[in-house]
Image (spheres, rainbow, N blue to C red):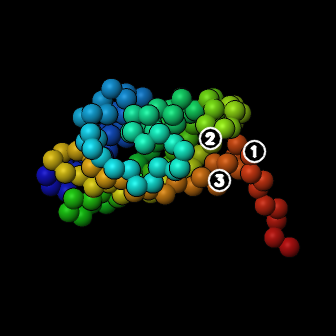
Amino acid sequence: MSTADNKALVQRFYEEVLNQKNLAALDQFVAPNAVNHTVPAGFPQGPSQFLGLHLNAFPDLQVTVEDLVADGDKVVARVSYRGTHQGAIRGIPPTGKPITGMAINILRIANGQIVEHWGLADRLSTLQQLGVVPTPGPVS
């Protein structure tokens, strides 16, 4: 696949799986033996379980792809996300609070599917928005 094809696949993944909440389409985008190198300890390792957990906690989650950069078989996606905390996650009961954040994801594509993922999301800001981690006061 070309880098343009790989970028289009990643864009469709965010739209169809996350924004449309279509976990049934996951098999079209993610290989059965895909490896997610960034799943936190204690979280489900399978893509449908991992994404399902987040979609349950934030059922109105919307992801906006801000940038896509591709080189060879890798696509880097800079995304913003927003949602409302309506389900438990990581032992945090639903707060009803809205969150916004940013993430960077690196996805390796092979044979038209995502086969590896590395990512970094702004989890500290999310926890602060949920009120479970204090926000620092002004600098003196």
Quickly name the residue at label 2: 90
> Foreground mark, 3 or 2?
2
Tags 1 and 2 touching, CB below 8 Å = no
Please tell me which residue is depicted at 27% across the width and 59% down the height of the picture: 74
* Amino acid tagged 2: Arg
> Which of the labelled discs sits on residue 104, or is there none?
none
Q: Reply above or below: 132 against 67.
A: above
For this rendering, which residue is in front, 138 or 127?
127
Q: Amino acid at mark 1?
A: Gly
Measured Cα–Cα span from mark 3 to mark 2 = 15 Å
Q: Secondary structure at mark 3?
A: helix
In this rendering, position of residue 56 left or right of residue 72 = right
- Spot occupied by residue 50 in the image (x, y as percentages of width and height): 46, 38
- For marks 1 and 3, the one nearer the N-term is 3
Q: Nearer the viewer, mark 1 or mark 2?
A: 2
Q: What is the x, y in percent for residue 88?
A: 63, 32
Total residue callouts:
3
Quadrant containing the C terminus is bottom right
Sequence-earlier tag: 3 or 2: 2
**Alpha-carbon distance for marks 1 and 2?**
14 Å
Q: Is residue 3 left or right of residue 11?
A: left
Label 3 CA crowd tier, 10 Å (few <14, some 14–19, many 20+): some
> Which amino acid type is marked by label 3?
Ser
Viewed as shown, does residue 29 lie left or right of 112? right
Q: Residue 68 sits in which quadrant?
A: bottom left
> Which residue appears farthest toward the right when viewing the image?
140
Residue 89's spot in the image, x, y percent? 61, 37
Q: Which residue position is annotated with label 1? A: 131
The tag on residue 125 is 3
Q: Residue furthest bottom?
A: 140
Task: Answer with mark 1 or mark 2, whichever residue precedes in sequence.
Answer: 2
* Mark 2 surroundings within 10 Å by alpha-carbon count, few (fewer than 14), some (14 through 19), many (20 or more): few
